[in-house]
Image (cartoon, rainbow, N blue to C red):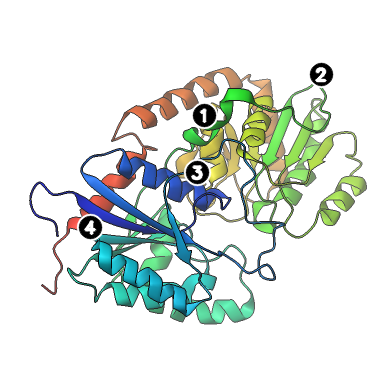
Amino acid sequence: MTDSGARTRFCLLGPTYPYRGGIAHYTTLLAQTLRADPRYEVLLLSFSQQYPGWLFPGRSDRDPSQRPLQTAAEFILNPLNPLSWRRTLRRMRAWRPDAVVIPWWHPYFAPAWSVLGRAVKRLPGRPRLIFICHNVLPHEQGRFGRFLLPAVLRLTLGPADGHIVHAQSDARILRQTVPGADPVVTPLPTYAALGNAATAALPEIPVALPNDRPLLLFCGFVRPYKGLDVLLDALPLALARRPLHLLVAGEFWQGAEAARAQIARLGLEAHVTLLDAYLPDELLAACIDRADVVVLPYRSATQSAVVQTAFGRGKPVITTNVGGLADAVADGRTGLVVPPEDPPALAAAIERFFAENLGPQMRQNVEAETAGAERSRSGRFAWRRLVDQLVKLAEKEDNHE
């Protein structure tokens, strides 16, 4: 490790702007937090290409935001090109990091990460290898994937000196799958900076929304595990008690036809608006600001950047008791938590939120917690809390030395 008084050098791998999505935002915010502290130096090595077009289910992996979160990076890595792995390794060898931090969220990256991870262990100075596991298992798994995944996880994550996860459920999976893994569990930090960067001039929401009733918001990439169909099934039950409107804002990765058919079958055409598009940061902030509450009826999850973005805009969340969501959303304080795949329970929570006028107090609680995360190292959602965990893993003595 570094001499006393020297700066700890972190090499981060992973997506950042111009790539889009929660993990790119995460990498950027982590790099910014480290760079703001004079005790650390950061080299961020990002992708020259993240996914080939034929593999990526979205319309584009580039961020169209007008005022994006961004930080300095070198774009040299292609997960499908072993020659770029060699260039990445040469760059790390020349820079001599104390720790290399790699994100894990999908087996697509396993070949690149397993080769680079093992090579990192042989670099001069023996830098620490740390994986940040956004989700240990992919959100949707085929039968073939479930059969191979344990071996892939052991091969890729096994050589690491440390792992960070954001949910106890992921920690259990990692311990069961990777021998010797002892992951650090810490909450997903705040995404308040994402909305704050966009606040200068929020755009008009490009769809008509009623002003005479409360607005529910479901936002982010629309994928089966996020449970939009459960929310649509719950909506008629909630509408029987009071007028409401639902805005579904986000890119449908498998097309919006099934959602449109369900809306028609339930007779919800006048009560649901679909905005099927990736939301630039400014539009995401505008949608959250316009809503009374964000509703995330996930079937499964580790954590959700949407929760932390909503909290960053001072907005309460109604969500399900899966993964780390119930740890992030304090039931009755910063939102409401219900069982997954339970439309009556979800409808009852929506009704309770409005019948008991929970919004004003919950917004105060959310704003207090988010402000604490911004100011404090020890705040539950503080980026500096995550950095402290990284530093501990980076500075542990190697057992083999």
N-terminal-most mark, 4 or 1:
1
- Contact between marks 1 and 2 (CB within 8 A): the answer is no
Residue 161 in view (yes/no): no
Secondary-structure class at tag 2: loop
Checking the image for residue 196, the label placed there is: 1
Q: Residues within 10 Å of mark 2 (few under 14, many from 20)?
A: few
Whether 171 is drawn above or below 192: the answer is: below
Question: For this rendering, which residue is in front, 3 or 212?
Answer: 3
Q: Amino acid at mark 1?
A: Asn
Tell me the residue that label 3 is attached to. Answer: 326
Residue at 72% across, 37% down: 347
Residue at 76% across, 42% down: 234
Residue 184 in view (yes/no): yes
Mark 1 or 3: the one toward you: 1
- Contact between marks 1 and 3 (CB within 8 A): the answer is no
Tell me the residue that label 2 is attached to. Answer: 212
Residue reaching furthest left? 4
Q: Is residue 132 left or right of 392 when viewed as pictured?
A: right
Q: Residues within 10 Å of mark 3 (few under 14, many from 20)?
A: some
Mark 2 or 3: the one toward you: 2
N-terminal-most mark, 1 or 3:
1
Q: Residues within 10 Å of mark 4 (few under 14, many from 20)?
A: many
Q: Amino acid at mark 4?
A: Ala
Secondary-structure class at tag 3: helix
Mark 1 or 2: the one toward you: 1
Checking the image for residue 394, the label placed there is: 4
Query: Distance from label 2 to label 4 (Cα)?
Result: 54 Å
